[in-house]
Amino acid sequence: MNAPAKPSKLIKGATGDWEIVVGMEIHAQVSSRSKLFSGASTEFGGEPNSHVSLVDAAMPGMLPVINEECIKQAVRTGLGLKAQINHRSTFDRKNYFYPDLPQGYQISQFKSPIVGEGVVLVDVSPTEQITVGIERLHLEQDAGKSLHDQSPTDSFVDLNRSGVALMEIVSRPDIRSAEEARAYVTKLRTILRYLGTCDGDMEKGSLRADVNVSVRRPGEGLGTRCEIKNVNSIRFIGHAIEVEARRQIGILEDGGKIDQETRLYDPGRGETRSMRSKEEAHDYRYFPDPDLLPLEFDQTFVDLLAKDLPELPDEKKARFVKSYGLPSYDAGVLVMERESADYYEAVAHGRDGKLAANWVINELFGRLNKEGLDITRSPVSASQLGGIIDLIADGTISGKIAKDLFEIIWSEGGDPRVVVEARGMKQVTDTGAIERAVDEIIAANPDKVAQALAKPTMLGWFVGQVMKQTGGKANPQSVNELLKSKLGI
Ligand code: MN
């Protein structure tokens, strides 16, 4: 815990180096058809106040009843975070006034959360993996939403979200840069999506991050932190950390001190600004909710859920490394989404796993990113991409022609083998034809021949010429061999 940052991650200030320290509280909306303590629908985008039960509206005398599915989702998530599952947890009232909180308090878990300490392994780059400790995960209710843009004189309230179940996942301050923070949230989102416990849709607010940022001199204790509330995109999380760290360093280097406070990130202006001074737990007057008994379950309940968990990203990644001989980072990229991992396995099945990974990551993902598409909308199917790879493997086409073929299949579709046949894209392995091209180019370029004899790396120029003359279809290996023997290199 609290490991020092690598020197490369330190920020240069006017008076020396600074280290960023980040911890995060992620609010993840539980995937469940109904709310945490009522049967009202959690569906997104309904008419305002169309998914509100008497409990969600906090009518007098209404009693909350815990939704078992939400408990199961929290336990599944705890298992996915390799965390301690607490067989007994309690619900507390967190008291504060807000117009979109009709109860006047949020039902949350304070002293005894349902999930305790866990861990998330995060690939930051091909050569760096970090471990981020999880302090706890607790269940709590979401609030409603105040609407200020419907009328010039009035504000309205929409309680559709009121009472929707959230998992608050609290990390240790183990993150040392904006890049690490982005990678952590990305990995956490991947785990939740694999588990099916949160859809991870940040645009719809299903995943929101409160980011605690402080700075310190390397080797010193923790500095005073500021909490940046409700950042709702992974890119913004990175920006918010960078600008907030810079702001704090500026204050400290001018001899000032940091006030612990809650701040808001404004992506338009690229700055954070003060919302309110930080409240402490005692400001909320937490106390056990008298309407709810402690939540208790036994190990059998946990075991049954554990038995039905899907293969998780870390396990899938380890299997990809072992079964397909992939570098760890590549395997990590492939398992980022369950759908991409399935696609890759369909391509790699019965083929060279590394070649398949190169094509999926470099060509396919590259092209999908460019078009802003996700894997489920790929114009090239796994069997088509597999077909292209087969044509390379059996020597029918070169890797270079395969890229052209990929483009054709991407825009026009079709069976790769049929397309190659129909368009005459087959690799020329007929040495007679290649030999004629080689002879012509050697005869036409005596000066280059002389250069090549003095400097054998010139061979590449000849290879290029032959490929050009044969429309890229000559087998590169045959070209190389023929050129070497003809030139006597
Ligand atoms: Mn919370």
Image (cartoon, rainbow, N blue to C red):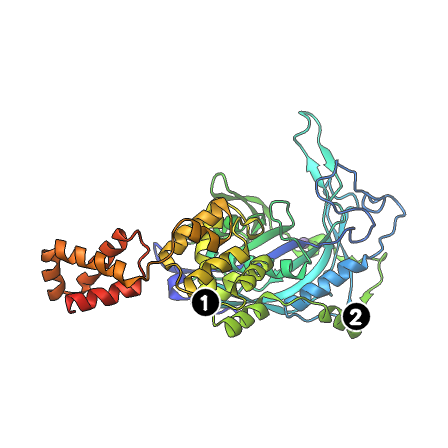
In the rendered structure, which amino acid carries the disc numbered 1?
Answer: Lys
Quarter holding the C terminus is bottom left
Task: Give the residue pinned by disc 1.
Answer: 354
Quarter of image, res 51: top right
Residue for point 85% across, 55% down:
65
Disc on res. 301: 2
Can residue 220 be spotted in the picture?
no
Does residue 352 show up? Answer: yes
Q: Nearer the viewer, residue 444 or 357?
A: 444
In the displayed structure image, the side of residue 419 where residue 161 appears, left or right: right
Q: Is mark 1 within 8 Å of ligand 1?
A: no
Tell me the number on the disc at residue 35.
Answer: none
Question: Which secondary structure, mark 1?
Answer: helix
User: Furthest-right residue in view?
Assistant: 61
Mark 2 surroundings within 10 Å by alpha-carbon count, few (fewer than 14), some (14 through 19), many (20 or more): few
Please provide percent x and percent y for residue 394.
42, 65
Q: Earlier in the sequence, mark 2 or mark 1?
A: 2
Nearer to the camera, 356 or 387: 387
Residue drawn 40% across and 53% down?
403
Q: Within 10 angstroms of label 1, few (less than 14), some, or many (20 or more) residues? A: some
**Looking at the picture, which amino acid does disc 2 mark?**
Phe
**Is 100 located above or below residue 213 in the figure?**
above
* Mark 2 vs mark 1: in front: 1
Count of picture labels: 2
Residue 31 in picture, x, y percent from top left = 71, 54
Determine contact: label 2, label 1, CB under 8 Å: no
Mark 2 residue's CB less than 8 Å from ligand 1: no
Q: CA distance from mark 2 to mark 1?
A: 41 Å
Q: Residue at x 53, y 48 (%)?
A: 379
Q: Position of residue 424 (x, y in %)?
A: 38, 51
